Amino acid sequence: MAKVLNFTVEGVQGDLKLEYGPFKLRLYQDGREVVRQGRFNPKYYVTNTNGEQEEMKIVYGFDFVHVVMFRGRKIDLEERLSTREYIVGGLPVLLILLGGLLGALFGVVGATFNYNYMRQEKSFVKQLLVSLGVSVFCYVAYFVFALAIQLMIAG
C-alpha cells in the first residue's frame, strides 16, 4: 500500500526516492535510506553535490501534497489540484460535521483516496463519479461502524 515518488533536487547528489504510506515516510538517496532526525519537526540530512551533509525537510500539508524544503526553496513532489478538484474530492470530509473525530477519520481517508485518484485521472466526469462513489461509501461505512459501536455498548 506504500506509494513511491522518485525525484531529483538541484544541489543534491544522486536520485531521491520518497516512500510513504498511512504511517510511514522514508527517504532514500541513491538506494540508501536517509535516517530521519526528530519526531515532531523531522529533518533529513542528504549529501549535496559537494559531498557535505545538508538539511532537507519533507512536509505533507492540508493540500494533500508532499513538498520538499531545501535551501529555502519549496519543491512540490506531486501535482497540485484545481480548486474544483479539491472541492469535489473533499466531499467525504463533511463527515466531520456529522461524526466528529470518527467522521473525520473516515472523511480524511476518503478524501486522500479521491485526491490520489484525481492526480491520475484527468476526465472531470470520471473524477466526479469516483468521488461521489467514495463519498457514499465513506458515509455508509461510518454509519455501519457507529451503529456497531452503539450495539456493542448497549449489548
Image (cartoon, rainbow, N blue to C red):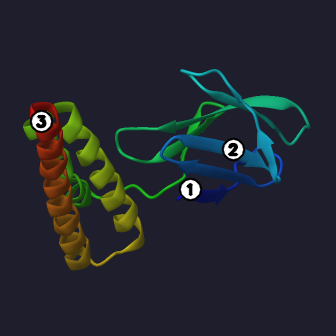
Q: Read off the residue under disc 1.
A: 2
41 vs 104, nearest the viewer? 104
SS for callout 3: loop
- What residue is at 14 percent from the left and 62 percent from the top? 136
Distance, label 1 to label 3, CA atoms, is 38 Å
Q: Please state which amino acid type lies under the numbered disc 2.
A: Leu
The residue lying toward the viewer, choosing from 44 and 106, is: 106
User: Circle 2 sits on which residue?
Assistant: 27
Mark 3–mark 2 distance (CA, rounded to whole Å): 47 Å
Query: What residue type is disc 3 on?
Result: Gly
Q: Nearer the viewer, residue 92 or 99?
A: 99
Q: Position of residue 73 (x, y in %)?
A: 58, 37
Q: Is residue 54 left or right of residue 95?
A: right
The reply to whether residue 115 is in sight is yes
| Residue denoted by label 3 | 155
Of the two numbered discs 1 and 3 on the same chain, state the one appearing first in sequence. 1
Q: Secondary structure at mark 2?
A: strand
Mark 2: give few (<14), some (14-19) or many (20+) Cα within 10 Å: many
Residue 91 visible in the shown view? no
**Amino acid at pointer 1:** Ala
Q: State whether residue 103 is above or below residue 153.
A: below
Q: Residues within 10 Å of mark 3 (few under 14, many from 20)?
A: few
